[in-house]
Image: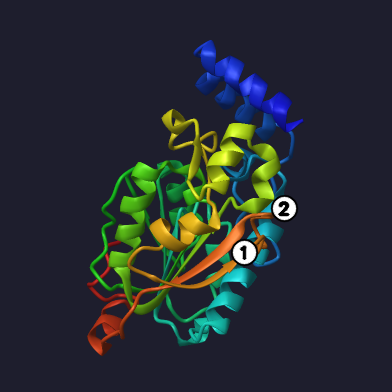
Amino acid sequence: MQRLKAGVISLLRKLGVLNRAYAAYETLQSWRSPERRRSDDGLSVPPPRLLVAVAGTPNVEWFLESGRRGADSIAEAAERNGRPLASLSSLLDFGCGCGRVIRHWQDLELAAHGSDYNGKLIEWCRRHLPFGTFTTNALVPPLPYDDDTFDLVYALSVFTHLPEELQLPWMDELRRVLAPGGLLLVTTHGDAYLDELTASEREQFWRGELVVRRDDMVGTNLCASFHPKEYVGGTLSRGLDLLELIPRGAKGNPHQDLVVLRRPGLRSRGARESARPGASGVSP
Protein backbone atom coordinates (compact mmCIF):
# COMPACT_ATOMS: atom_id res chain seq x y z
CA MET A 1 0.00 0.00 0.00
CA GLN A 2 2.83 2.39 0.88
CA ARG A 3 4.52 1.70 -2.46
CA LEU A 4 1.25 2.32 -4.32
CA LYS A 5 0.76 5.59 -2.46
CA ALA A 6 4.33 6.65 -3.21
CA GLY A 7 3.85 5.77 -6.88
CA VAL A 8 0.68 7.85 -7.17
CA ILE A 9 2.35 10.82 -5.48
CA SER A 10 5.36 10.51 -7.78
CA LEU A 11 3.13 10.44 -10.86
CA LEU A 12 1.11 13.47 -9.75
CA ARG A 13 4.34 15.30 -9.01
CA LYS A 14 5.72 14.58 -12.50
CA LEU A 15 2.48 15.85 -14.01
CA GLY A 16 2.79 19.07 -12.01
CA VAL A 17 -0.57 18.66 -10.26
CA LEU A 18 0.47 17.35 -6.85
CA ASN A 19 -0.40 20.54 -4.96
CA ARG A 20 -3.85 20.74 -6.50
CA ALA A 21 -4.48 17.03 -6.04
CA TYR A 22 -3.50 17.21 -2.37
CA ALA A 23 -5.76 20.22 -1.80
CA ALA A 24 -8.64 18.32 -3.42
CA TYR A 25 -7.89 15.30 -1.22
CA GLU A 26 -8.06 17.44 1.93
CA THR A 27 -11.36 18.96 0.80
CA LEU A 28 -12.89 15.54 0.14
CA GLN A 29 -11.66 14.26 3.49
CA SER A 30 -13.29 17.18 5.30
CA TRP A 31 -16.67 16.19 3.87
CA ARG A 32 -16.52 12.74 5.43
CA SER A 33 -17.44 13.72 8.97
CA PRO A 34 -20.15 15.99 10.44
CA GLU A 35 -18.90 18.97 12.39
CA ARG A 36 -18.89 18.60 16.17
CA ARG A 37 -18.89 21.83 18.14
CA ARG A 38 -17.86 20.87 21.69
CA SER A 39 -15.87 18.26 23.55
CA ASP A 40 -15.96 17.06 27.14
CA ASP A 41 -13.44 19.72 28.17
CA GLY A 42 -15.91 22.48 27.30
CA LEU A 43 -13.79 23.81 24.44
CA SER A 44 -14.84 24.05 20.82
CA VAL A 45 -13.72 21.45 18.30
CA PRO A 46 -12.18 22.69 15.04
CA PRO A 47 -14.19 22.21 11.83
CA PRO A 48 -13.35 19.20 9.64
CA ARG A 49 -11.30 21.23 7.14
CA LEU A 50 -8.88 22.25 9.89
CA LEU A 51 -8.74 18.76 11.38
CA VAL A 52 -7.76 17.38 7.97
CA ALA A 53 -5.09 20.06 7.51
CA VAL A 54 -3.47 18.98 10.77
CA ALA A 55 -4.08 15.23 11.01
CA GLY A 56 -5.16 14.15 7.53
CA THR A 57 -8.50 12.95 8.89
CA PRO A 58 -11.70 14.70 10.07
CA ASN A 59 -12.16 12.16 12.87
CA VAL A 60 -12.97 14.21 15.96
CA GLU A 61 -12.52 11.34 18.39
CA TRP A 62 -8.98 10.72 17.16
CA PHE A 63 -8.17 14.44 17.25
CA LEU A 64 -9.17 14.61 20.91
CA GLU A 65 -7.67 11.26 21.93
CA SER A 66 -4.37 11.79 20.13
CA GLY A 67 -4.11 15.25 21.68
CA ARG A 68 -4.66 13.78 25.13
CA ARG A 69 -2.02 11.12 24.49
CA GLY A 70 0.40 13.76 23.26
CA ALA A 71 -0.20 15.85 26.37
CA ASP A 72 0.34 12.79 28.57
CA SER A 73 3.64 12.03 26.81
CA ILE A 74 4.84 15.58 27.38
CA ALA A 75 3.78 15.63 31.03
CA GLU A 76 5.40 12.25 31.72
CA ALA A 77 8.66 13.21 30.01
CA ALA A 78 8.83 16.50 31.91
CA GLU A 79 8.21 14.67 35.19
CA ARG A 80 10.86 12.02 34.45
CA ASN A 81 13.42 14.70 33.72
CA GLY A 82 12.88 16.81 36.81
CA ARG A 83 10.61 19.52 35.35
CA PRO A 84 7.00 18.62 36.29
CA LEU A 85 4.48 20.85 34.55
CA ALA A 86 3.23 22.26 37.86
CA SER A 87 6.69 23.75 38.45
CA LEU A 88 6.85 25.59 35.10
CA SER A 89 6.03 29.21 34.34
CA SER A 90 5.73 28.97 30.57
CA LEU A 91 5.63 26.64 27.60
CA LEU A 92 5.56 26.88 23.81
CA ASP A 93 3.74 24.52 21.47
CA PHE A 94 5.73 25.02 18.24
CA GLY A 95 3.58 23.83 15.36
CA CYS A 96 0.46 23.93 17.52
CA GLY A 97 -1.95 23.48 14.59
CA CYS A 98 -5.53 23.98 15.74
CA GLY A 99 -4.73 23.26 19.37
CA ARG A 100 -4.71 19.46 19.40
CA VAL A 101 -2.35 19.32 22.41
CA ILE A 102 -2.30 22.81 23.88
CA ARG A 103 -6.04 22.61 24.68
CA HIS A 104 -5.09 20.17 27.44
CA TRP A 105 -3.15 22.85 29.34
CA GLN A 106 -6.15 25.13 30.01
CA ASP A 107 -6.15 24.32 33.75
CA LEU A 108 -2.42 24.81 34.29
CA GLU A 109 -1.21 27.98 36.00
CA LEU A 110 1.38 28.90 33.42
CA ALA A 111 1.73 30.98 30.27
CA ALA A 112 0.76 28.68 27.39
CA HIS A 113 1.87 29.87 23.96
CA GLY A 114 1.35 28.36 20.54
CA SER A 115 2.93 29.13 17.17
CA ASP A 116 2.23 27.77 13.70
CA TYR A 117 3.00 28.46 10.05
CA ASN A 118 -0.68 28.21 9.06
CA GLY A 119 -2.45 31.48 9.87
CA LYS A 120 -5.93 29.93 9.59
CA LEU A 121 -5.12 27.45 12.34
CA ILE A 122 -3.74 30.22 14.57
CA GLU A 123 -6.83 32.37 14.01
CA TRP A 124 -9.03 29.49 15.13
CA CYS A 125 -6.93 29.03 18.27
CA ARG A 126 -7.16 32.73 19.11
CA ARG A 127 -10.94 32.63 18.87
CA HIS A 128 -11.58 29.37 20.71
CA LEU A 129 -8.69 28.78 23.15
CA PRO A 130 -8.75 31.95 25.26
CA PHE A 131 -6.34 30.67 27.90
CA GLY A 132 -3.44 30.67 25.42
CA THR A 133 -1.48 33.22 23.40
CA PHE A 134 -0.93 32.43 19.73
CA THR A 135 1.27 33.75 16.96
CA THR A 136 1.91 32.92 13.31
CA ASN A 137 5.49 32.13 12.40
CA ALA A 138 7.14 32.27 8.99
CA LEU A 139 8.66 29.25 7.30
CA VAL A 140 12.06 30.39 8.57
CA PRO A 141 13.10 31.85 11.97
CA PRO A 142 12.90 33.98 14.02
CA LEU A 143 10.04 33.70 16.50
CA PRO A 144 8.70 36.88 18.18
CA TYR A 145 9.93 35.93 21.65
CA ASP A 146 12.80 37.11 23.80
CA ASP A 147 15.78 34.92 24.62
CA ASP A 148 15.35 32.47 27.52
CA THR A 149 11.55 32.80 27.58
CA PHE A 150 10.17 29.25 27.98
CA ASP A 151 10.66 26.48 30.52
CA LEU A 152 9.38 23.91 28.03
CA VAL A 153 9.14 23.86 24.24
CA TYR A 154 7.72 20.96 22.26
CA ALA A 155 7.33 20.33 18.54
CA LEU A 156 5.23 17.27 17.71
CA SER A 157 5.41 16.05 14.11
CA VAL A 158 7.09 19.26 12.96
CA PHE A 159 10.65 18.21 12.18
CA THR A 160 9.17 15.17 10.45
CA HIS A 161 8.08 17.55 7.67
CA LEU A 162 11.08 19.86 7.28
CA PRO A 163 14.25 19.54 5.17
CA GLU A 164 17.62 19.88 6.88
CA GLU A 165 18.13 23.48 5.75
CA LEU A 166 15.10 24.43 7.86
CA GLN A 167 15.45 21.92 10.68
CA LEU A 168 18.82 23.17 11.89
CA PRO A 169 17.94 26.90 11.98
CA TRP A 170 14.70 26.06 13.78
CA MET A 171 16.52 23.95 16.35
CA ASP A 172 18.85 26.89 16.98
CA GLU A 173 15.86 29.20 17.31
CA LEU A 174 14.01 26.94 19.74
CA ARG A 175 17.18 26.68 21.81
CA ARG A 176 17.36 30.49 21.85
CA VAL A 177 13.85 30.95 23.27
CA LEU A 178 14.29 28.05 25.70
CA ALA A 179 15.49 29.04 29.15
CA PRO A 180 18.71 27.49 30.48
CA GLY A 181 17.74 24.20 32.10
CA GLY A 182 14.53 24.08 30.07
CA LEU A 183 13.33 21.06 28.10
CA LEU A 184 12.81 20.72 24.36
CA LEU A 185 10.72 17.78 23.12
CA VAL A 186 10.54 16.86 19.44
CA THR A 187 9.24 13.82 17.57
CA THR A 188 10.91 12.11 14.63
CA HIS A 189 10.37 9.34 12.08
CA GLY A 190 12.79 6.67 13.27
CA ASP A 191 13.37 2.95 12.75
CA ALA A 192 9.61 2.23 12.78
CA TYR A 193 9.38 3.83 9.32
CA LEU A 194 12.09 1.79 7.60
CA ASP A 195 9.53 -0.25 5.65
CA GLU A 196 8.29 2.96 4.03
CA LEU A 197 11.72 3.78 2.60
CA THR A 198 13.15 2.66 -0.70
CA ALA A 199 16.26 0.49 -0.72
CA SER A 200 18.53 3.48 -1.41
CA GLU A 201 16.82 5.53 1.29
CA ARG A 202 17.31 2.72 3.81
CA GLU A 203 21.01 2.62 2.97
CA GLN A 204 21.19 6.35 3.57
CA PHE A 205 19.30 5.97 6.85
CA TRP A 206 21.59 3.14 8.04
CA ARG A 207 24.60 5.38 7.34
CA GLY A 208 23.17 7.76 9.94
CA GLU A 209 22.09 10.36 7.40
CA LEU A 210 18.84 12.30 7.36
CA VAL A 211 16.42 11.15 4.65
CA VAL A 212 14.14 13.80 3.17
CA ARG A 213 11.36 13.31 0.63
CA ARG A 214 9.76 16.03 -1.46
CA ASP A 215 11.71 18.93 0.03
CA ASP A 216 10.09 21.17 -2.58
CA MET A 217 6.75 20.58 -0.79
CA VAL A 218 7.91 22.12 2.49
CA GLY A 219 5.05 23.66 4.41
CA THR A 220 2.84 20.63 3.75
CA ASN A 221 2.66 17.10 5.15
CA LEU A 222 3.91 15.80 1.80
CA CYS A 223 7.43 16.81 2.77
CA ALA A 224 8.69 13.97 4.98
CA SER A 225 11.94 13.51 6.92
CA PHE A 226 13.32 10.37 8.56
CA HIS A 227 15.82 10.63 11.41
CA PRO A 228 18.38 7.92 12.31
CA LYS A 229 19.41 7.86 15.97
CA GLU A 230 22.95 8.90 15.01
CA TYR A 231 21.65 12.02 13.30
CA VAL A 232 19.45 12.96 16.27
CA GLY A 233 22.25 12.40 18.76
CA GLY A 234 24.74 14.38 16.72
CA THR A 235 23.52 16.96 14.25
CA LEU A 236 19.94 17.63 15.38
CA SER A 237 20.70 17.95 19.08
CA ARG A 238 23.79 20.16 18.73
CA GLY A 239 24.13 22.61 21.62
CA LEU A 240 21.64 20.65 23.75
CA ASP A 241 21.87 17.74 26.17
CA LEU A 242 20.18 14.61 24.83
CA LEU A 243 18.28 13.14 27.79
CA GLU A 244 16.08 10.54 26.08
CA LEU A 245 15.39 9.07 22.67
CA ILE A 246 12.42 6.73 23.02
CA PRO A 247 11.54 4.64 19.95
CA ARG A 248 7.81 5.00 19.20
CA GLY A 249 7.53 7.03 22.39
CA ALA A 250 5.30 9.78 20.98
CA LYS A 251 1.95 8.39 22.08
CA GLY A 252 -0.13 11.03 20.33
CA ASN A 253 1.81 10.62 17.08
CA PRO A 254 1.87 6.82 16.75
CA HIS A 255 5.16 5.20 15.72
CA GLN A 256 7.15 8.44 15.96
CA ASP A 257 10.15 8.57 18.29
CA LEU A 258 10.15 10.96 21.24
CA VAL A 259 13.32 13.01 21.73
CA VAL A 260 13.87 14.86 25.02
CA LEU A 261 16.58 17.54 25.09
CA ARG A 262 17.70 20.06 27.67
CA ARG A 263 19.38 23.42 27.27
CA PRO A 264 22.46 23.47 29.51
CA GLY A 265 22.65 25.95 32.37
CA LEU A 266 20.42 27.36 35.07
CA ARG A 267 17.56 29.76 34.60
CA SER A 268 17.67 33.16 36.29
CA ARG A 269 14.79 34.43 38.39
CA GLY A 270 14.39 37.45 36.10
CA ALA A 271 13.82 35.26 33.07
CA ARG A 272 11.22 33.26 34.98
CA GLU A 273 9.31 36.40 35.95
CA SER A 274 9.29 37.76 32.39
CA ALA A 275 7.51 34.66 31.06
CA ARG A 276 4.47 34.93 33.32
CA PRO A 277 1.10 35.96 31.86
CA GLY A 278 0.94 39.69 31.29
CA ALA A 279 4.70 40.19 31.43
CA SER A 280 6.38 42.12 28.63
CA GLY A 281 8.97 39.47 27.76
CA VAL A 282 6.69 37.57 25.34
CA SER A 283 5.06 39.05 22.26
CA PRO A 284 1.30 38.42 21.80
The residue that mark 2 highlights is: 62
Q: Is residue 10 above or below residue 218?
A: above
Circle 2 packing at 10 Å, graded few (<14), some (14-19), many (20+), is some
Find residue 69 and report its horizontal and vertical position in percent: 67, 65
* Distance in Å between CA atoms under marks 1 and 2: 12 Å
Residue toward you, 69 or 182: 182
With 34 as the anchor, is 156 left or right in this view? left
Q: Residue furthest right?
A: 1
> What amino acid is labelled 2 in the image?
Trp
Label 2, secondary structure: give it: helix
> What amino acid is labelled 1 in the image?
Gly
Q: At 28% from the left edge and 84% from the top edge, which residue is drawn?
A: 273
With 75 as the anchor, is 233 left or right in this view? left
Q: How many marks?
A: 2
Label 1, secondary structure: give it: helix
Which labelled disc corresponds to residue 70?
1
